[in-house]
Amino acid sequence: MAEDRDPNLSRRRFIQTAGAAGIAVTLAGCSSAVRAKETTPAKRGSVRFGIQTPPQQVTYQDIVDTWKEADDLGFDSLFAFDHFMPIFSDITGPCLEGWTLLAALAAQTRQAHLGLLVTGNTYRYPAVLAKMVATVDQVSNGRLIVGIGAGWFEPEHVAYGIPFYTPGGRARRLGESVQVLKLLLTQPRSNFSGKYYQLKDALCEPKSIQTPHPPILIGGVGPKLLQPIAARYADIWHFFTRSGDPEEARNLCTGFDAVCRKVGRDPAAVEKATSLRPDQFKGSLNDVRPHVQKLRDLGVRHFILQLSAPYDREAVRRFAKQVMPALREA
């Protein structure tokens, strides 16, 4: 899954900026970085708010500035996306790679959780991804959310020569990948013999700071393929409605709860998250509250403002100062 998006920053300056920030965080947090943090899902009844800034048609500095401000404003989560070329816009424009960007942003922020909404499973072998996950959780001092999905953007696969399997093939690979990630992040040595992925006495050191592993967010709404995977393995399930219709959301959430029970999982153990389009969060408290409240009544506890280039930081400020506090208290 994915959600969204320029001025002149040289590669050398990018590397210098990310490197300097990483060194500063390492020195400042060297004693705390080795202390494990238990992964703690949101308390039942509590609500979280985040933003997503697709790293396309923008510069690295645009993203840094937006994330730092959102972090200071008290947002709970910050997300980018995982694509190699722009989507839903000019494909010849700039698009920063998600995981390397995430490592740099982890060193530039202080308190919000962060991740990609979501990692395309087809883009990386899961054992390699596990090393990336552990590293970014170390850089962030235990603030990573591992967002992952089956992968969907076929033109990107064709352009880069990445195999694009059937929906079933992608879903089955996703299920195995999440198992591989959990093994590598929790076991001293990992062995796995799946249809698509294998491990033999595989090491993954250092582990993530969060224990047993960073929270895993699985994105997708397919009731036959993706929801059962999320029900089994996810700490957070991210869904979206194309129409924004609360009744569509109700059907999705009710269906997901039933899938959780079918696989033997308490639906309350999986945090429900969804994205809010600009027309759903740009307005007064009275404009925003009814839609959010309907979703809260369905058990949704994590709301992510979906931004696009150029990022409307004034709308983010207004939401944080005028809307978010009241919605947290509701």
Image: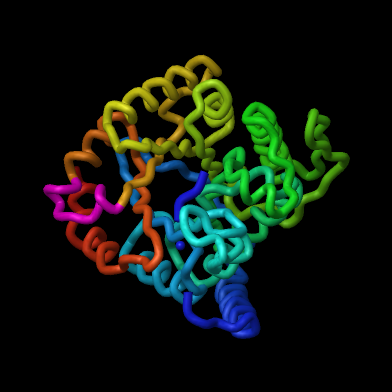
Judge left or right: residue 6 versus residue 130: left
Is 142 one of the magenta-colored residues? no
Confirm whether residue 172 shows in the render.
Answer: yes
In the image, residue 181 lies at what x, y percent? Answer: 69, 42
Confirm whether residue 33 shows in the render.
Answer: no
Q: Which residues are magenta?
A: 278-288
Judge left or right: residue 317 versus residue 261: left
Q: Magenta span: helix, strand or loop, mainly?
A: helix
Residue located 72% across and 38% down the image: 180
Choose top left, top right, bottom left or bottom right for residue 206: bottom right
**Residue that protrudes farthest toward the right in the picture:** 200
In the image, residue 228 lies at what x, y percent? Answer: 55, 24
Judge left or right: residue 27 versus residue 203: left
Q: Is residue 100 above or below residue 323?
A: below
Q: Is residue 261 above or below residue 113?
A: above
Q: Is residue 198 above or below residue 329?
A: above
From the viewer's side, name the closer residue of 6 and 199. 6
**Residue that protrudes farthest toward the left in the picture:** 286
In the image, residue 37 lies at what x, y percent? Answer: 55, 52
Choose top left, top right, bottom left or bottom right for residue 11: bottom right
Choose top left, top right, bottom left or bottom right for residue 243: top left
Q: Which quarter of the image is occupied by the C terminus?
A: top left
